Amino acid sequence: MKSDKKQTVFMIGIVFLILAGIMLYVTLKAPHIYEGEDYSYSTAISTTKETLSVKYPLNINTASAQELAAVEGMSEENAKAIVAYRQENGAFSDVSEIMNIKGIGEKTYYNVAPYLDV
């Protein structure tokens, strides 16, 4: 009888450790976007012709397709689609509007949102 109780307590402890690990993983994996914080930093991107210097957060209303493609998690196709959408529909009022573009879903949005601004 005593060993059954110990085994149950042990299993509950294991479950709590697994849940704590999952919560820690999800917390560290999610992008952290805090209003009012300054996320400015620069990176240099080498292309065949020149070195492109990009300052983050990148304004999606003024950035070129090449600058947008430099954002981690953004494909060249998505970058070109953002520029085309902007030309057809006017300026973005919020970064989340990029999810209106075919090919950019929630996963892509959450990966690139910390690097973008309007």
Image: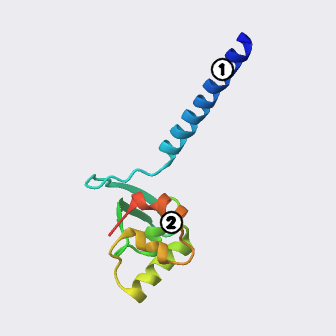
Q: Quadrant of residue 86?
A: bottom left
Task: Give percent across and percent down for residue 114.
Answer: 40, 57
Query: Quick check: 25 above or below 9?
Result: below
Quadrant where the N terminus lies?
Answer: top right
Query: Quick check: 1 above or below 54?
Result: above
Residue, far front: 1
Residue drawn at x 52%, y 65% is 106
Task: Give percent across and percent down for residue 43.
Answer: 40, 56
Q: Colour scheme of this structure image?
A: rainbow
Task: Give percent across and percent down for residue 105.
Answer: 54, 68
Residue drawn at x 51%, y 46% is 29
- Nearer to us of marks 1 and 2 is 1
Q: Which mark is residue 110?
A: none
On the rendered structure, is 84 left or right of 19? left
Question: Which element carries disc 1, helix, strand or loop?
Answer: helix
Q: 10 Å neighbourhood of mark 2: few (<14), some, or many (≥20)?
A: few
Between 6 and 65, the one nearer to me in the picture: 6
Give the residue at mark 1.
Answer: 10
Q: Mark 2: which amino acid?
A: Thr
Give the residue at mark 2.
Answer: 47
Q: Mark 1: which amino acid?
A: Phe
Which of pointers 1 and 2 lies earlier in the amino acid sequence? Answer: 1
How far apart marks 1 and 2 lie (CA) works out to 56 Å
Task: Give percent across and percent down for residue 50.
Answer: 45, 67
